[in-house]
Image (spheres, rainbow, N blue to C red):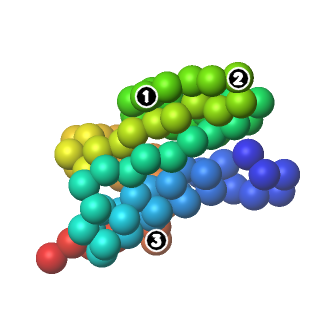
Amino acid sequence: QIRGSPALVALSSAYLIYDFAFFSLGLQEALFDVRNENISVKKLHSRYASIIYTDELNTYFSFLKSDFIKINNVFGKKLPSEVLIKKE
């Protein structure tokens, strides 16, 4: 958590990024890496993304649109209503 920021800032930003990537851009998969020393971010992504590979510097993740849809109910219960995107 960033000092002085609300507790759900990281979760909210991750939700918004994935929602934009999967629904606005039409992507089916997000591929990304996290520095191994960034423990809190690595822990956050390890909860829902699959680890593809780890080396001495990074851990590489894959997160599917289908998995985002499945866990969307979990995200939605934890996020402020202002963050949630209404789908029509």
Write down the quadrant of residue 24 in the picture: bottom left
Taking the image as drawn, is residue 21 in sight? yes
Residue at 24% of width from left, 68% of height from top?
26
Q: Position of residue 30 (x, y in %)?
A: 39, 51
Q: Which residue lies under the disc numbered 1?
A: 52
Lower sequence index among marks 1 and 3: 1
Q: Amino acid at mark 1?
A: Ile
Q: Amino acid at mark 2?
A: Glu
Mark seen at residue 37:
none
The extreme left residue here reads 88
How many neighbours does mark 1 have within 10 angstroms: few (below 14), some (14-19), or many (20 or more)? few
Residue at 76% of width from left, 30% of height from top?
37
- Per the model, the C-alpha gap separating discs 2 and 1 is 14 Å
Q: Amino acid at mark 3?
A: Glu
Q: Position of residue 2 (x, y in %)?
A: 78, 51
**Residue in the foreground of this view, choosing between 82 and 52:** 52
Above or below: residue 76 compared with residue 82: above
- Per the model, the C-alpha gap separating discs 2 and 3 is 39 Å
Q: Position of residue 22 (x, y in %)?
A: 30, 62
Mark 1: which secondary structure? strand
Q: Which residue lies under the disc numbered 3?
A: 82
Lower sequence index among marks 2 and 3: 2
Q: Which residue lies under the disc numbered 2?
A: 56
Q: Position of residue 68 (x, y in %)?
A: 30, 47
In the picture, measured across the screen, residue 12 lies left or right of residue 63, that is: right
Taking the image as drawn, is residue 47 in sight? no
Mark 2: which secondary structure? loop
Above or below: residue 16 compared with residue 24: above
Mark 3: which secondary structure? loop
State which mark lies toward you, 2 or 3: 2
